[in-house]
Image (tube, rainbow, N blue to C red):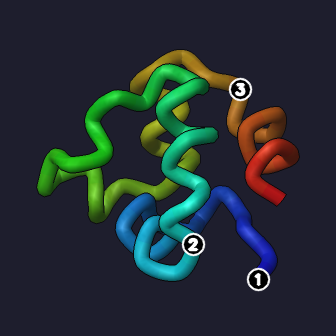
Amino acid sequence: MKIDKTMTIGELLEQAPEKAEILLNAGMHCLGCPASQAETLEEACAVHGIDVDELISKLN
């Protein structure tokens, strides 16, 4: 599975739940929040001040 910045957090966690640890370590501690499930990785990174390209690299 290729992960990109348009994928929602919900899609990512549904398809690859083991990636949650990477998101948590990056500072995204709201993975269980219902609103976060519909956010794209790019949107979540913008909210948290995280470099989306760096995170995508780690996730892939």
| Amino acid, disc 1 | Met
Question: Circle 1 sits in a helix, a strand or a loop, which is it?
Answer: loop
Quadrant containing the C terminus is bottom right
The answer to whether residue 8 is left or right of residue 2 is: left
Instruction: Give how far across and how far down residue 41 sits, in percent.
Output: 53, 51
Task: Decide which of 24, 56 is in the foreground and name it.
Answer: 24
Three-letter amino acid code at disc 3?
A: Asp
Residue on which disc 2 sits: 16
Please report the residue visible at 59 percent of the width from the left and 25 percent of the height from the top.
26
Between disc 3 and disc 1, the foreground one is: 1
Q: Nearer the viewer, mark 3 or mark 2?
A: 2
Q: Is residue 59 left or right of residue 20?
A: right
Q: Quadrant of residue 14?
A: bottom left
For the residues labelled 3 and 1, the Cα–Cα distance comes to 21 Å
Disc number placed over residue 1 in the picture, else none: 1
* Residue 45 percent across, percent down from the top left: 53, 33
Tell whether label 2 touches label 3 (CB within 8 Å): no
Q: Earlier in the sequence, mark 3 or mark 1?
A: 1
Residue 58 image offset from top left, x and y in percent: 81, 43
Kind of element beneath mark 3: loop
Query: Which residue does the image show at 27% across and 35% down from the upper left?
Result: 30
**Decide: marks 1, 2 in contact (CB < 8 A)?**
yes
Q: Nearer the viewer, residue 23 or 5?
A: 23
Residue denoted by label 3: 51
